[in-house]
Structure formats: C-alpha cells, structure tokens
C-alpha cells in the first residue's frame, strides 16, 4: 500500500509504477483505492454488466498492471460539485441516498461494499497495489476512515509512506505521520520514500539514519525530481512547466474553471512535440492561443457563470469571430450552445455562449458508456478528422439537440457525428460529447501529424525509474513479507 504524508505527495504515480513493476514479474496485479475524490473519471465494466465510473488514476493503474479496469478497483468515487457537496458513486453507479447522508454515517454504510470489493480482487490476483488518500494521520477522521489505515489493517498491507521533499519539512512530515498512528498501524509502515528530490543525495545524511532510529522504519528510496514522466497528475491542473518540446507549432489553451472534469484526457497534448498546453483562468492566459478548449465540467452552469465573471466569455467569442479554433468537450459543448435547461433541478438553468445553435437539457439518468463511431464530414481546422473512426467515452447528464427555431430558419449546426458532435457553419467551432479524443492515436496523427508516446511506454518508464532508485530487494520483500 502506498500512503502519503499529504495530498500530492506522489501516491498515484508511485502506485502506477508499482503496478507495472509487479506485472513485469509475470504476476497478476490489480490496483485498489477504496475512496477517490476526483472529477477525473473513466468508464469501465460494471459488476452486473453495463458500465460504471471509477477514478482515472485507478483506470491508468489497471492498464499499467495489464488488466481490465473494473469498478471494484475504486468502489467509492466522490465527484465534487460545490465546495460542500459531492456526487457519490458506489460501485460505479450514482447513489443519491448516500449523497444525502452525513459523512460519519456514510462511511459505515459503504465499508461492507469496499471490503467486499477488495476481497474479490484479492481472490483473483497475485498482488494488489493499494493507494491511500490524503494522509493517514488525519486524527479527526481516523474513527471514520475507510480509505487509509482501515484498508491497510483489513488487507494486512505492507505500507510505504511517501513524502514530497521538494516542499520542505519532509522528515517532520514522515515522523509526524508515523507518530500519530497507533502502534498496530505503525507496525505496517515498512519504508519511507522521499519523492521529488533535487541535488546531491549525500546531503540528506544523517537524516534518514536519525529517522530510522526514531521510528524503526528505513528510508527505502530517494526519487529524483522528474517533471515529464508522461502520466497525468490526478489533481495537478496548473502546471507551469507545460512547455513545448522542439519548435513551437501550436498553443492550446484549456479553460480551467473551478469544477473542471476529466482534465487528464489532455495529457497526450502535453507530450506532443511542438505543442504547448496552457491552463487558462483569465483572458491574458489565452493570448496567442491557436485553440481555445472548453473542457468537461462537474457543474456546468456554475462553471459557465465563473467563465463569464472572468471575462472569458468575451475572449472565447472574439477568438471564434476571428476564425480561431474553439473546441467544447461534454460540459464545454453544452456551454457553447444557446441555453442550458434544467427541469429536474440537477445543475441549473443558464444562457449559453451562443456559438452553436444547440440546446442542452439535464436529465435525471446519467449517461455512462464507452463510444466508438466514425466521423462524417468535418470542416475548418478539424477537417483532417473527416471519415475517421474515433473511440472514447461519455459521462454526462445532459441531452443536446439543435435549437428548433434556429434550425427551422436555416441556422442549424452540422453534425459530423449525430448526437455526439456538432459544429458551426463556418467550421471553426466544434463541440463533442466524446471524452478521450486526444488519447486516440489516429486523432493525434490527423490533427498534428505525430502521435504521443504510448501509455505502455510511459508505464515502462515509471517502472524503470523505481527499479533504479529503490534499494535492492525492497520491492520483492514488500510482496513476500
């Protein structure tokens, strides 16, 4: 199990690396995270047929482990809608009753499903690599914990505790986290990991030795800073190190509203030579962009209001009026239309940006499914996609149709993919419900003439990295203890 002293310490990518490392040993491996709080989700097979949602991190970890992702790998997913409310997804499906429960009552209600999901995975695999959440030393939450040490105790897991040394205070973080755990949980911590170290590792002495004298726990790895490993950071939107490699050919600005969802689908763009990806929160951030992208949103009407408050509505409209490329994905597609209608009180009514002659209505039933289709004729900067077979996934509450009056007046939208994609008459504004387009190698080749490094290449690079920097024998001992 990979625990962290804080959120963002490096749990997700280290778990992914361990999944690939053990899979390369010929073992049947599965990832597990009892509870994930993220608006980055993927569509995977459900327990009784059909499809459900899990956090994107566990989806990538399953691919790294070379197994089919499934809902048991992340039995509880919380998708924040506001600062005080989250949609609750249990075993892949939205559960409104759980969403209405107080937190302490909810944790006990969901624990049997979490334990059963883990036990099922353990019975079918040789190794389970578990990811914790936040810190296991949140003593105010320890009694209701269902994602850190309760899972560790249930699994009798060999635990690594990772910290981000680049933030400073790493030894205090490690010692303080260990010290706040009860003795039976301290005994599960088998090694400390220093992540994102810059400089000469010899300068760390005598810190690791002194820490081991205090805790009995050795420091088993010092991992150097590595910015461009190619795996999307689960919560890392505002990456100031998004720089194009090679000569700059295209700048893509993704509007980063507060409830942005599925941001990880843009990671392949960061890996393309000549492409610069910018996360934009102000009109100034969009200056010089060739494309403006409105991504998915977990609260479309609220994010649309935020976009207007920042003046980004005018930025998008002006860019489109100049013939600039504008792409809307899922919630972004809904924003590009004429109106958002909410008869069931799901998301909120709002006027759209009016760049596509569409109307979206929020429905009670959520659409969650993989999608494969072939695009029809696509115009403008997207014309290279014409006739292309594409694959991805849908996660949305809305249903979008052409505005009836505008269509009757001859101002309708073109539909290169009926029910999933629309574009304006000029061809420069495109809206799609399909997530994952930029993870399709054919789409990248068509639009940019090159492909991003494959996920297998990324996963193998992660495994190579930890095999180089962990102390000899540690990774084997963790699964044979």
Image (spheres, rainbow, N blue to C red):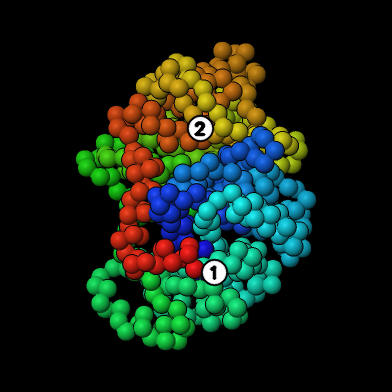
Label 1 secondary element: loop
Residue 289: quadrant of the picture: top left
Label 2 secondary element: strand
* Residue 188 image point, x, y percent: 54, 73
Residue 286: quadrant of the picture: top left
Q: Residue at x 68, y 49 (%)?
A: 90
Q: Callout 2: 10 Å neighbours few (<14), some, many (20+)?
A: many
Q: Callout 1: 10 Å neighbours few (<14), some, many (20+)?
A: some
On residue 135, the disc is 1
Q: Residue at x 74, y 62 (%)?
A: 108
Do callouts 1 and 2 mark residues in contact (Cβ within 8 Å)?
no
* Residue 407 image point, x, y percent: 60, 16
Residue 202: quadrant of the picture: bottom left
Q: Residue at x 76, y 58 (%)?
A: 109
Q: Residue at x 42, y 21 (%)?
A: 388
Q: Nearer the viewer, residue 78 or 222?
A: 222
Judge whether residue 467 can be spotted in this image.
Answer: yes
Q: Which residue lies most toward the left here? A: 247
Q: Nearer the viewer, residue 38 or 292?
A: 38
100 relative to 157 in the view: left or right: right
477 versus 394 height, above or below: below
Q: Nearer the viewer, residue 300 or 168?
A: 168
444 relative to 397 in the view: left or right: left
* Residue 456 image point, x, y percent: 38, 43
* Residue 308 image point, x, y percent: 53, 44
351 versus 76 height, above or below: above
Q: How many numbered callouts?
A: 2
On residue 392, the disc is 2
- Return the disc, 1 or 2, that comes first in the chain's sequence: 1
């Amino acid at each position: 199990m990979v625990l962290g002293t804080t959120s963002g310490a490096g749990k997700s990518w280290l778990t992914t690396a361990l999944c690939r490392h053990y899979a390369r040993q010929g073992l049947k491996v599965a990832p597990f995270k009892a509870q994930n709080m993220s608006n980055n989700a993927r569509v995977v097979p459900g327990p009784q047929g059909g499809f459900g949602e899990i956090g994107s991190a566990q989806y990538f970890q399953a691919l790294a482990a070379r197994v089919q992702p499934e809902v048991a790998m992340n039995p509880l997913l919380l998708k924040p809608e506001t600062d005080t409310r989250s949609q609750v997804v249990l075993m892949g499906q939205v559960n409104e009753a759980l969403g209405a429960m107080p937190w302490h009552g909810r944790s006990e209600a969901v624990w049997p499903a979490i334990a059963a999901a883990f036990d099922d995975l353990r019975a079918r695999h040789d190794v389970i690599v578990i990811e914790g959440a936040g810190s296991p030393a949140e003593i105010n939450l320890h009694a209701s914990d269902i994602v850190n040490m309760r899972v560790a105790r249930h699994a009798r897991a060999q635990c690594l505790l990772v910290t981000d040394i680049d933030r400073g205070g790493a030894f205090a973080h490690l010692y303080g986290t260990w010290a706040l755990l009860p003795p039976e949980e301290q005994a599960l911590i088998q090694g400390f990991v220093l992540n994102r170290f810059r400089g000469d590792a010899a300068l760390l002495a005598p810190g690791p030795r002194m820490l081991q004298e205090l805790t009995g726990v050795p420091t088993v790895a010092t991992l150097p800073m590595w910015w461009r490993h190619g795996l999307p950071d689960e919560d890392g939107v505002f990456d100031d190190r998004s720089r194009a490699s090679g000569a700059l050919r295209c700048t893509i600005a993704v509007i980063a509203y507060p409830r942005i969802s599925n941001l990880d689908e843009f990671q392949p763009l960061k890996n393309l030579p000549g492409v610069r990806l910018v996360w934009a929160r102000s009109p100034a951030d969009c200056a010089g962009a060739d494309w403006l992208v409105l991504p998915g949103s977990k609260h479309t009407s609220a994010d649309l209001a935020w976009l207007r408050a920042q003046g980004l509505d005018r930025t998008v409209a002006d860019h489109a009026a100049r013939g600039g490329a504008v792409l809307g994905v899922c919630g972004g597609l809904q924003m590009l239309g004429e109106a958002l209608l909410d008869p069931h009180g799901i998301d909120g009514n709002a006027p759209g940006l009016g760049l596509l002659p569409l109307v979206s209505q929020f429905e009670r039933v959520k659409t969650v499914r993989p999608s494969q289709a072939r695009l029809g004729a696509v115009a403008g900067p997207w014309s290279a996609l014409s006739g292309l077979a594409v694959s991805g996934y849908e996660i949305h509450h809305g249903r979008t149709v052409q505005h009836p009056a505008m269509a009757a007046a001859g101002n309708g939208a073109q539909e290169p993919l009926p029910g999933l994609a629309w574009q304006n008459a000029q061809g420069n504004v495109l809206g799609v419900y399909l997530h994952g387009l930029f993870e399709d190698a054919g789409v990248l080749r068509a639009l940019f003439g090159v492909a991003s490094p494959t996920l297998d290449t990324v996963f193998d690079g992660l495994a190579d990295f930890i095999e180089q920097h962990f102390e000899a024998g540690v990774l084997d001992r963790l699964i044979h203890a």
